[in-house]
Amino acid sequence: MELGLFQKQTLNLVMTHELRQAIHLLQYSTLDVRSYLEELALENPLLELKNTYQKDNHPKLSSKTSDEKHQALENTPNANGTLKEYVNQQLVDLSLTPSQTKRLAFLIESLNEDGYLPESTVFYCNWLGCSEEELQEVVQILQSLEPAGVGAFSLAECLYLQVIRQHLDHPVTRAVILNDLEKVAARKWKQLAKTYGVTMLDIQEIYDVIRTLQPRPGASFYTNPTVYIEPDVHFTLFNGEILVSASSTIVPTVEINNEYKELLQFDQQTRRYCIEKEQQIEWLLTSLKQREKTILQVAEVISFIQAPYFLSKKGQLQPMTLQMIATELDIHESTVSRATANKYAQTPRGLLELKSLFTARASAVNDGISNASVKALLKQMIESENKEKPLSDQQIVELLKNNEGISLSRRVIAKYRDELGILSSVKRKRYDDHERIG
C-alpha cells in the first residue's frame, strides 16, 4: 500500500441553496409563492413587498362561492352553526325531564361529523348509567330531530329513518334497506326480486329512492375552507389566435428597502449582514423572473398544441405529453412537470388546470386521437344509449371503429369507462313495466 498525495479531478453535481429555491418556486402555486414571500419578508429586513394584485387588468375571478351568491340574491343570513348547535336548538320546544336532558346532551355531543352515534348502545348505557329502554327513549327523541337521519347507529338505520320521515313507503323498501342494502348497491336485483316476491321494476324503484337519500346527514354542517384559485397565465382569443400572457401582478413585487439598508451601514458586522440579505433578495428576484419565463414558455407551447380545443367549442384535446413540451423547449421533462404543477390558466373554455390539458394518445394506431377525446365520445354514447339495452364494451368498440374510425380494444374501453366512473352494461340496465322475474 503506497502512501502519498495525489491530485484527482472529479465532476460533482452540487445543488446550491439558490438552485433549490428556484426549483421550489417553480413548482409552487401562486398562493404558495405569495405565502413564501411573506414568510421571507419576516426574516429579511431589507425585503419589501408591494402588493400589485389590484393593478392586474385581467378579469378577476369572483371571491364569492355559489352558496354566498344565492344567499345574496335571497337576502338570507349565512348559518354558520355546527350540527350539534343546530340539534341543540331544537330541544328548546321539547318537554324533557332533567334525566332526558342530560342524556340527550351527552348523545348530541357524541355525534360525529356525519351525524352518527359512533359507539354501541352498551357503551352509552354504561356511560350514562341507564337501562337500554331508557337509552332508546332519548335516542328516539334525537332521531326525530332535523336533519333526518341524525342519531343513527348505522348507514342502514340512517336511510331507514329518512324513508319513514319522507313517507317513501314502497311495500318492501324498509325491509330491503335494513336487511339487503349491500345487495342493492351491488345491483343484485334479480336475487332481491325473488327474495321479496316483487318485480325487477319494484327493486329498481327502491334503488332510485335510496339514491335520493342522504347517507351523511351531518355533512352539510362541516364545510372545508374555500380555496381561491388564481390563474397563473391567461389564454386570450384574439383574431383567431391564442395569445398567452403571464399573470405576474398577482405575485407581490419584491424590492430592496433602501432606507433600512442605510441604517445597517454603521459597522462592519452589520454591513456583512446587509450584504448577505441583499444578495438573498437578488437571488430571489432572479428565481421569480425565471419562474415566470419558464411558465410562460410552457404555456405558449401548450396553447399552440391545444389551439383546436380552445378555438372551437366542439374542439377536442390533442395528444400532448410532458416529453413533447420538453423536446420543443429543449428542457428537462421534470422542469415541465414543475412548471405545470398547481398552475391554472384562464382560457376561452374557462379556468383550467394546466395538468388537465395533458393527454396521451388513445392508442398506437390513433396518432391524432387523445384518450380525453375518446372518453368524451364514450360518455356521450352511454348518455344517449337505450337504458333498457345498454351498450356493452364490445359494442362500443365496434361503434367507435365504424362511426369514428377509432380502433381500440375492449380492455381499453373498460379502462376508460372505469376512469369515468361509469358502470358496466349489466349494472346500467333499467327495467320497464313488463319486465318481471322469470
Image (cartoon, rainbow, N blue to C red):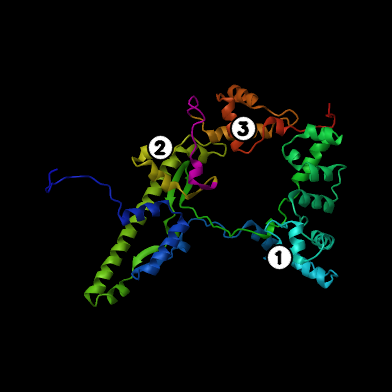
299 over 29 or under it: above or below? above
- Quadrant placement of the C terminus: top right
Relative depth, front residue between 3 and 214:
3
Q: Residue 342, how many percent across, how many down?
A: 48, 50
* Cα gap from disc 1 to disc 3, whole angstroms: 48 Å
418 over 9 or under it: above or below? above
Tell which circle, 1 or 2, labels the residue nearer the N-terminal end. Answer: 1
- Quadrant placement of the N terminus: top left
Q: Residue 272, how many percent across, how many down?
A: 24, 70
Tell which circle, 3 or 2, labels the residue nearer the N-terminal end. Answer: 2
Query: Circle 2 — which element?
Result: helix
* Disc 3 to disc 2: CB gap under 8 Å: no
Question: Which residue is tagged 3?
Answer: 378
- Relative to 396, 334 lies left or right: left
Residue 81 falls in which quadrant of the image? bottom right
Q: Amino acid at mark 3?
A: Leu
Q: Residue 109 — which label?
A: 1
Query: Circle 3 — which element?
Result: helix
Query: Residue drawn at (41%, 66%), measured in percent from left and top?
Result: 50
- Relative to 419, 158 lies left or right: right
Residue 170 falls in which quadrant of the image? top right
The span picked out in magenta is 350-367
Q: Amino acid at mark 2?
A: Gln
Can the viewer see residue 86? no
How many numbered discs, if any? Answer: 3
Question: Which residue is tagged 2?
Answer: 323
Query: Residue drawn at (45%, 58%), measured in percent from left and top?
Result: 32
